[in-house]
Image (cartoon, helix red, strand yellow):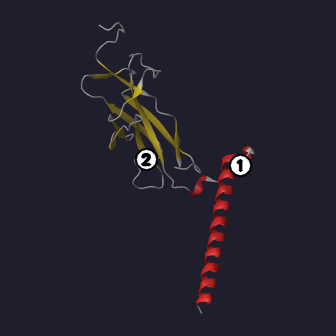
Amino acid sequence: MADTALVALISTLVLVGTIAIIAIALRLRRKRRRARGNPNPAGDYAARTAWTGGRGALNYSSFVFMDVDGDGKFGQADRPIAGIVVRAYDEKGAFLAAVRTNNGGFANFVMSVKKHRATLRAPGTYRFSVSVPKGWRVSTGNEDQWLRLDSVPGAPSGLAGEDLPKCGASTGCPRSGRGD
């Protein structure tokens, strides 16, 4: 009896050990294959499909940056500003929403003809107003920005429009670059 139990135990250990060795070998093989990559660039991205099955909403963003040199253009020294309030109004002047810019400097407004909670839901002209902090000024001259959205059937959100221009803000202090 004891011999049979010992044989069964040893057989089980050999079987478990064999399975473990096979699993380790397969894992190493998979890692080597991943590290090697695929030389065919056609498999780098998923195949394009129709957009109709998506969420049906996109972010429409207003970009606000700190105009360090005060030239009114977004350049190498300029940085995005977080926490600036941007307000959206419809073509009748009715207030729609106020959104703060994120760390990247973007105030994101949801745009969709399908979503009832979207800020921008219908074709028309919208006004975006940047509210700069006290002591700052808009160096780009576009504190209020107007945007026309058109209906585009088949687009992910059902609407499309041009990009909003970048809005630069700077402190009232002149920058001479001489340290004075």
Residue placed under numbered mark 2 in the picture: 110
Q: Is residue 130 left or right of residue 45?
A: left
Query: Is residue 48 in view?
Result: no
Select label 2 or label 1 by which is in front: 1
User: Depth check: 18 or 109 in front?
Assistant: 18
Residue 173: image quadrant is top left
x then y, percent, for residue 113:
48, 52
Name the image quarter holding residue 115. Answer: bottom left
> In which quadrant will I find the N terminus?
bottom right
The image shows residue 146, relative to residue 156, as above or below, that is above
Answer whether residue 98 is visible to the viewer in this image. Answer: yes
Q: Secondary structure at mark 1?
A: helix
Residue appearing at x 43%, y 47% in the figure: 110
Where is residue 46 shown, x and y percent of the image? 66, 51
Residue 142 lies, with reference to residue 158, above or below; the image says above
Question: Badge 1 is on which residue?
Answer: 43
- Residue most extreme to the right: 40
